[in-house]
Amino acid sequence: MEYNIMICTDNNYLYQTSVLIKSLIINNNDKLFDIYIVGNDLENKELNNLINRFNGENSIKQINYINVGVKNLNVFQVSGHISAAAYYRILALDMLPESVDRVLYLDCDIIVNGDIKNLYNIDFNDDLIAAAEDVKISKKFKDVYENLQLDNNERYFNSGVILFNVGELRKIDGFENQLMNIAMDKNIVLRFHDQDVLNKYFYKKTKFIDDKLYNQVVKGIKNRKEADWVCSNSIIIHYADRRKPWKYNYVGYLDDEWWKYEILLNGKENYNEYKKKHIIYRYIPFGILRKIKRIFKKDI
């Protein structure tokens, strides 16, 4: 059995994409993966470096590149750390080979910390996707529900981890155009960008999975005890925030978990440089750093 994985990226995130792939194959070395890298005119040299690095791995059947070929990126609503690359999966779904009947999409600010078998083989029943509730947003951001004309009693999902029922989606005439029409509709306020698009389209067509296991957002971890539980139990760990573990000014938990796979991939040189620059953020108590952030209004 082959496992289809889709990762959307751009030239700025190929490095992080490599770390994600490394974590995936380390923790699932008994599986065979077809990996689809989705981008828009990625630099050939960097892309080839990534492909060549992994194509010799026993767990990799092939790494494929899907070029969405978007000429006008201004059609997408973006801001902050959300780039147009977030929308590429919408375009790529219709570009997957006919042999693909399901695909697991992963954001590239993720590490896979365990066996994905149970997630990948989930029974869709009549649903089109499987995804985890975004507990920060779900039922709490009334304006999001109003903008998307959704019932705020329904759950809202995080789009960083989605298992797509591609076989059933293909039966919907023009599903990719329907998704793109939502993405480009200037009358719809997309507070959470492509995630809002997907929530609107897959409204009541979503099978909800355990967020603690399959899309544990690091920002939601409150203390070291919770962090230790995540390390031992969570299958997919998601650094879904402006603060990223590869940045020296990272404030949060589990940066060492991300660096564990980076070291396996590249050795300790990058990690040692990170430790030197990160030392003040590591040893000043987390709560104090957050207060400093609020005082100076800087995203540390």
Image (cartoon, rainbow, N blue to C red):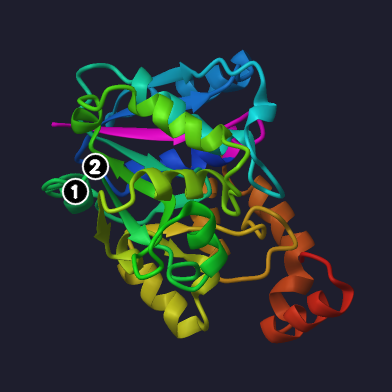
Q: Earlier in the sequence, mark 1 or mark 2?
A: 1
Q: Nearer the viewer, residue 248 or 215?
A: 215
- For the C terminus, give its image quadrant: bottom right
- Residue 48 position within the rendered picture, expressed as x and y whole percent measured from the top left: 53, 17
Residue 267 placement, left or right of 132: right
Q: Residues within 10 Å of mark 1 (few under 14, many from 20)?
A: few
Could you tell me residue 91's position as x and y percent? 45, 25
**Amino acid beneath label 2:** Leu
Badge 2: residue crowd in 10 Å (few <14, some 14–19, many ≥20): many
In the image, is residue 48 above or below residue 238? above
Residue at disc 2, secondary structure: loop
> From where the camera sits, is residue 54 visible?
no
Residue at 30 percent across and 56 percent down: it is 114
Q: Nearer the viewer, residue 50 or 298?
A: 298
Residue at (38, 33) in percent of width and height: 6
Q: Quadrant of residue 187?
A: top right
Q: Which residues are magenta?
A: 1-15
Residue sitting nearer the eye, 118 or 62: 118
Asked if residue 181 lies in the magenta stretch, the reply is: no
Lateral position of residue 215 relative to residue 250, left or right: left
Mark in front: 1 vs 2: 2
Expressed as whole percent of the image width and height from the top left, the position of residue 223 reads: 52, 83
User: Which residue in the protein does label 2 denote?
Assistant: 128
Q: Is residue 263 above or below residue 41?
A: below
**Please, is residue 195 above or below residue 32 in the view?**
below
- In 3D space, how far apart are the residues under numbered discs 1 and 2 (Cα atoms)? 19 Å
Query: Pointer 1: what residue?
Result: 117
Type of amino acid under label 1: Lys
